[in-house]
């Protein structure tokens, strides 16, 4: 075993010191996120995600949700914002954009945005000035009103 002297965490902060850790893999096994590593997923009841550019299946929490908007991955994106102006829940899937249509997306995350009290009102919103991957927006109502803005 070698002594650990410095590690950079996924948030960019360094950890310095010594210890009985033989490799970075041991840190990952302990749940310590290391810069450049893939995070651990402790979710329960996760939905089965659709293939890229496909609708959700007929079962699960997002049963039969339809794809209503897609923003392709683009390194030149400065900011992306999603505002749910429909009166129903929407689901947003983010992925790294490397998978083709009809394939399983890589490095995915999913989150829901609440609907507004009335169509055209302000529901849930999300924005990022660092995310450069693909965004897919889904809703039970295929004609839902959702604003997706990209700069």
Image: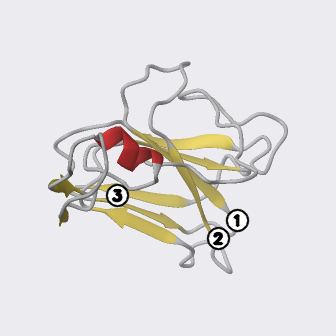
User: Residue 7, position in %: x, y?
Assistant: 20, 54
Q: Is residue 88 left or right of residue 10?
A: right
Mark 3 to mark 2 CA distance (whole Å): 17 Å
Q: Earlier in the sequence, mark 1 or mark 2?
A: 1
Q: Answer with the quarter of the image where residue 5 lies.
A: bottom left
Q: How many marks?
A: 3
Q: Answer with the quarter of the image where residue 48 lies.
A: top right
Which residue is under mark 3? 149
User: Residue 20, position in %: x, y?
Assistant: 31, 52
Which residue is under mark 2? 115
- Which residue is pictured at 22% across the width and 43% down the height? 2
User: Residue 35, position in %: x, y?
Assistant: 25, 49
Mark 3 to mark 1 CA distance (whole Å): 19 Å
Q: Nearer the viewer, residue 13 or 141?
A: 13
User: Are discs 1 and 2 less than 8 Å apart at CB?
Assistant: yes
Which residue is under mark 1? 88
Label 3: few (<14), some or many (≥20) within 10 Å?
A: few
User: Are discs 3 and 2 less than 8 Å apart at CB?
Assistant: no
| Residue 38 at least partly seen | no
Secondary structure of the residue carrying numbered label 1: loop
Label 2: few (<14), some or many (≥20) within 10 Å?
A: many
Q: Quadrant of the C terminus?
A: bottom left
User: Residue 147, position in %: x, y?
Assistant: 46, 60
């Amino acid at each position: 075993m070698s002594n650990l002297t410095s590690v950079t965490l996924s948030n960019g902060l360094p950890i310095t010191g010594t210890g009985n850790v033989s490799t970075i893999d041991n840190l990952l096994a302990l749940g310590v996120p290391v810069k450049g590593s893939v995070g651990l997923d402790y979710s329960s009841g996760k939905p089965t995600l659709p293939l890229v550019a496909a609708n959700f299946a007929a079962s699960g929490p997002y049963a039969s949700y339809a794809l209503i908007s897609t923003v392709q991955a683009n390194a030149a994106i400065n900011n992306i914002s999603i505002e749910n102006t429909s009166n129903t829940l929407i689901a947003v899937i983010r992925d790294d954009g490397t998978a083709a249509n009809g394939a399983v997306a890589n490095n995915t995350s999913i989150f829901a945005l609440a609907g507004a009290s009335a169509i055209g009102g302000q529901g849930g919103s999300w924005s990022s000035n660092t995310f450069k991957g693909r965004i897919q927006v889904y809703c039970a109502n295929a004609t839902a009103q959702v604003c997706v803005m990209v700069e």
